[in-house]
Amino acid sequence: MPPPPYTDSAATLREAGVTTVACLLDRNELPAALEAAYAGAGLRLLHFPVPDMGVPRDADAFHAYLRGLLDRLAAGETIYVH
């Protein structure tokens, strides 16, 4: 039986040293199986939904999200932007 969808991709990210996934998909675009695969691979998922082909609705909140990502990078984390 093949592994659940996304399992191999999430494992490959983890093997490459990724610790955190920065996900900009709207909630309705993020498959539950992908979210589960990230968790199963030990990846932290930081979600900030941005409308498809759009811009963040709250610039201040997005700035804080990006600041948090920069802080994580400075602390040695490896981030995959999805």
Image (cartoon, rainbow, N blue to C red):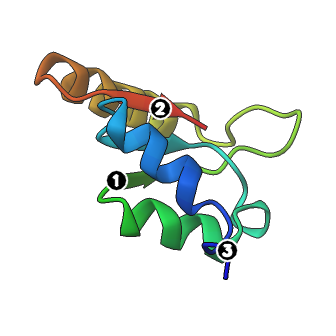
Q: Is residue 47 visible?
A: no
| Structural distance between the alpha carbons of marks 3 and 2 | 25 Å
Q: Hey, what amino acid is under mark 2? A: Tyr
x, y percent for residue 42: 29, 59
**How many numbered discs, if any?**
3
Q: Is residue 9 left or right of residue 64?
A: right
* In this view, the mark in front (3 or 1): 3
Quarter-of-image position of residue 15 = top left
Circles 2 and 1 in contact, beta carbons < 8 Å: yes
Quadrant position of the C terminus in the picture: top right
Residue in view at x 80 percent, y 46 percent:
51
- The amino acid type of the residue labelled 1 equals Leu
Label 3–label 1 contact, CB within 8 A:
no
The residue under label 3 is 2
Chain-order first, disc 3 or disc 1: 3
**Residue placed under numbered mark 2 in the picture:** 80
The residue that appears at 44% across and 39% down in the rendered structure is 13
| Sequence-first tag of 3 and 2 | 3
| Label at residue 43 | 1
In the image, residue 69 sits, relative to residue 26, either above or below, namely above
Which residue is drawn at the image coordinates 78% and 69% (left, top)?
28
Residue 27 location (% of width, % of height)? 69, 65
Does residue 38 lie above or below 52 as drawn? Answer: below
- x, y percent for residue 75: 10, 24
* SS for callout 3: loop
